Amino acid sequence: MSEAVATGHGATVPTPAVRVQRQTVSGIIAMAIGIGVLITIASMPWWASQGLIRNVVELCCYIAVAQMWNLLAGYAGLVSVGQQAFIGVAAYMMFVLAQLWGINPFLAVLLSLIAPAILAVPTYGLLHRLDGPYFAIGTWVVAEVMRLATSTFTYVNAGAGMSLRVMTGYSADERAVGVSLLSALLLLVTIGGSYWLLRSRYGLALTAVRDNPVAAASQGVNVGRLRFLVWIAAAVGTGLAGSIYFLAQLRITPPSAYDPNWANIAIFIVMVGGLGSLEGVLIGALIYFFADRWFGEYGATYLVVLGLLTLFMALFARGGIWGLICKVVDAPWFPTRRILLEDKR
């Protein structure tokens, strides 16, 4: 609707009606493709090989862990190098629930999310007073403490690890169905949930915190509470990825559960794809996944190349590959901006 604005001469000039555009053609196309991808992943047991299912599950876990790290570093300004703590604690809880307590392993994946949520509360209480590199180092210390504690906890077989023998009670087809559905749910929660969050009023607050937390606080944004909620959400999302990943692996040990390489993977994916963008996470995850498959056999040389690529992007293309694409074409897959347009109707 339009309103009239009075001029200095007593006359009124009608102001043009405006509307807020939040969706784009590219976003609609991407949403349709995304729904198709979720359906395809959920239906894999009926057409895909076991090897392909394992690869897709692994890729989904990479995407989820990277997006949770992206939510922390790209929006809340919390750079963590210890997210593997939540991967390990959730995965071990799933093994305890399924193997030792006899709970359905697929249900145990969801119940195991209680563990990272509980762990996230005291860890944030300890770490939130730290800034920058001190916060990052603190998260790594938490992960190492969890690894050492698990390695001495005889209830979970200490450093020898655990095997998910209860899965032998399910056929290969039943396991494939369960893992595929959980993987589709994982992407829906982490990518879809992040998109929903960023389009909400909390997303506006997160964007303000990312740009300037001091200015955001001066405008009424409760920066501390918002960061705490994002920390909890990232812990739960990361834990869900860890539970699904080790459910598919059928075995867990403290070094694998709390492997610092999880943080390295997340950082590489986000920095190369594009910090602070959902599109960048998807691009970076695909690059890492295929690079690991094709060049992982080169060992140390391959890791050095990945490190140099990450450094190069940080120095010369801070927006990542998605940032470079945006300089050429404005076609977001996950539009979160609010564009004010004149309503010509």
Image (cartoon, rainbow, N blue to C red):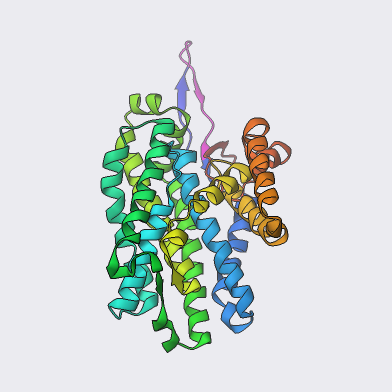
Q: Is residue 330 visible?
A: no
Could you tell me which residue is drawn at 48 percent across and 66 percent down?
Answer: 245
* Residue 281 x/y as whole percent: 58, 50
Residue 311, picture quadrant: top right
Which quarter of the figure is the C terminus placed in? top right
Q: Which residues are magenta?
A: 7-19
Residue 158 percent across, percent down from the top left = 34, 65
Q: Front-most of 122 and 163?
A: 163
Q: Is residue 171 above or below residue 243?
A: below
Front position in the image: 324 or 307:
307
- Rendering coords of residue 268 (x, y %): 59, 46
Point out residue 230 in the picture as x, y percentages from the top left corner: 37, 46
Dividing the picture into quarters, in which one does residue 151 lie?
bottom left
Above or below, 263 relative to 58: above
Q: Is residue 343 magenta?
A: no
* Residue shown at 65% from the left, 39% from the top: 323
Q: Along the horizontal axis of the image, is 121 left or right of 201? A: left
Q: Is residue 132 left or right of residue 280?
A: left
Q: Is residue 17 part of the magenta span, yes or no?
A: yes
Along the line of sight, which residue is nearer the eye, 267 or 165? 165
Give the vertical position of 143 relative to 100 (above or below): above
